[in-house]
Amino acid sequence: QVQLVESGGGLVQAGGSLRLSCEGSGRTFSSYYVGWFRQAPGKEREFVARIDWSSRNIRYAESVKGRFTISRDNAKNTAYLQMPTLKPEDTAVYYCAAGSVVTTNPLAYDYWGQGTQVTVSS
């Protein structure tokens, strides 16, 4: 079992930045892929970024590529999503998830955090 807790969300103006954290419990956290997803009101949950255990296999959604950076520190059982130059369209609840399959499909992830709200004002 892995439990995930996100933090770092908040309200920022367009162009501002936030860093989300996802702290995992359990000694096996470092062996899981970690994905970040987001869900805006009235929309489906969408993939944002994912990272493998070694941090060598990373993938981003086209909408955030070149802006967001995913990383992890296995010694701290924590994954991060650095989000500079935020846009109003980035407003959503952001979730981290852990899974054992390399995929952008949220259905394939086994464990989820409770989510953290990110609101970007124009």
Image (cartoon, helix red, strand yellow):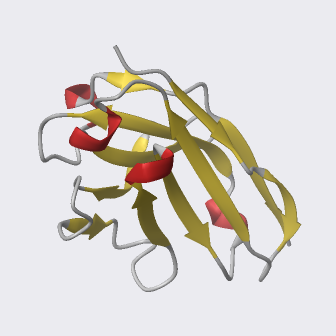
Q: Position of residue 15 (x, y in %)?
A: 77, 83
Quarter of the image for residue 27 reads top left
The C terminus lies in quadrant: bottom right
Q: Nearer the viewer, residue 49 or 38?
A: 49
Quarter of the image for residue 111 reads top left
Q: Position of residue 64 (x, y in %)?
A: 46, 73
The N terminus lies in quadrant: top left
Q: Is residue 41 left or right of residue 34?
A: right
Q: Can residue 20 be seen in this snapshot?
A: yes
Could you tell me which residue is drawn at 68 percent across and 82 percent down?
A: 85
Number of on-image labels: 0
Quarter of the image for residue 97 reads top left
Q: Is residue 78 above or below residue 98?
A: below
Q: Position of residue 3 (x, y in %)?
A: 47, 21
Q: Nearer the viewer, residue 40 or 35?
A: 35
Could you tell me which residue is drawn at 43 percent across and 71 percent down?
A: 63
Could you tell me which residue is drawn at 47 percent across and 26 percent down?
A: 25
Q: Is residue 68 left or right of residue 107?
A: right
